Amino acid sequence: MNSKSTTVIPLSEVGRARPAVSVPETAVPATGSLLDRLGRPLTDLRISVTDRCNFRCSYCMPKDVFDKDYQYLPHSALLSFEEMTRLARLFASHGVRKIRLTGGEPLLRKNIEGLIEQLSELRTPAGEPLALTLTTNGSLLQRKAAALRAAGLQRVTVSLDSLDDAVFRHMNDVDFPVADVLAGIDAALAAGLGPLKVNMVVKRGTNEQEILPMARYFRDNHGGKVVLRFIEYMDVGATNGWRMDEVLPSAEVIARIGAEFPLVPLEPSAPGETAQRWAYADGGGEIGVISSVTQAFCHDCSRARLSTEGKLYLCLFASAGHDLRPLLRGTATDEDIASAIGHIWQGRADRYSELRALRGPDSAESDGNDNNKAPRRVEMSYIGG
């Protein structure tokens, strides 16, 4: 883990290296289908609604960096719900079919139900509603699940790294009990926010012993309405002290579970899906693994990420974003902003994880566009996982 002497770029500074976003001279019409330089469509948008979180997980927001003196974004810098909805509508006109609200911890954003209500009214060019989901650490889910569902949220994904209370309290580093997260999962399912996904980040030497207990628990409870997914510990941002020797490959996760519960592979449920799906051979549900370190899936990544202050990031491992806020708060029309978004996506060639795999973890960092060396990457807590 990094010490407090580590140099960290304030979140409000991230992305200033890029030129200001402007309306392109050649218009990019919104046709419902937009491809980047590698032929990847734009289908998913992740909106970070806050840069704050009430957990201090070491792989995301370590306490020695994100302490009481850390300078978060001022409220005036954050996009309003109306601004987020306007952008989401324009992204939908380019082909986005799924929106995930993330953070930080998105349930810390005051009256987030109001944003969900606005987003639930959006439609694709064909008139279909967008898939609307949210990722949470589960700490506030028990009290908010019913209101979230009533507002129009369809599903939730809960981050949970251990069932052992001592391990979980150590990993979230704020002494939060695992029982309260499990109660939140129960409340979400009761409210109709399912099927629900649970994401477990596996860090070798920290919680790998929890793989089988997690698999047993979610296999035996909730009647198949919860899909447990195991995520390889990723080198996101610059503050989590990532090391390759702390990565437990997904292949080993599958081997451990398969030794107790035989597994059979499943086809992806949708193009560009991040998780490889496996079913229990006896029909006891399914699990997934997300292998962004050992089996990069950049080749069909169709996700864009919008920060809470309006910067558009084209990769989870990006170092800079495209600032859309001046256009939103200026005189630009919807057509102007949609054209700017289209121009940015058409220039996208990011494939960080594939290049890292080619060069090896100890080689010079890449910015995802084949450049030899990249600036410090943006933190996951700023643009969501």
Image (cartoon, grey):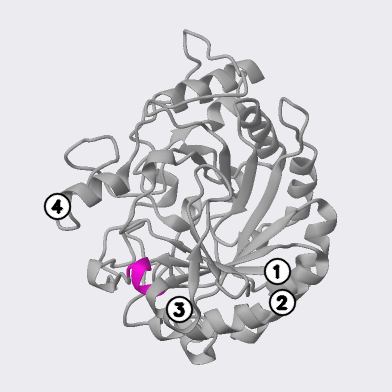
* Element at label 1: loop
Camera-nearest label, 1 or 4: 1
Q: Tell me where residue 44 appears, x and y as whole percent.
A: 57, 41
Camera-nearest label, 2 or 3: 3
Q: Tell me where residue 70 appears, x and y as whole percent.
A: 44, 63
Residue behind mark 3: 257
Question: Badges 4 and 2: C-beta atoms under 8 Å apart?
Answer: no
Question: Badges 1 and 2: C-beta atoms under 8 Å apart?
Answer: yes
* Element at label 4: loop
Q: Main secondary structure of the magenta part?
A: helix
Q: Label 3 sits on what residue type? A: Ile
Magenta stretch: residue 250 in it? Answer: yes
Q: Is residue 124 above or below residue 179?
A: above
Residue behind mark 1: 225
Mark 4 neighbour density, 10 Å: few (under 14) some (14–19) many (20 or more): few
N-term-proximal mark, 4 vs 2:
2
Residue behind mark 4: 363
Q: Is residue 326 above or below residue 130?
A: above
Q: Is residue 117 left or right of residue 205?
A: right
Mark 1 neighbour density, 10 Å: few (under 14) some (14–19) many (20 or more): some
Question: Badges 1 and 4: C-beta atoms under 8 Å apart?
Answer: no
Q: Label 2 sits on what residue type? A: His
Q: Which residues are magenta?
A: 249-253
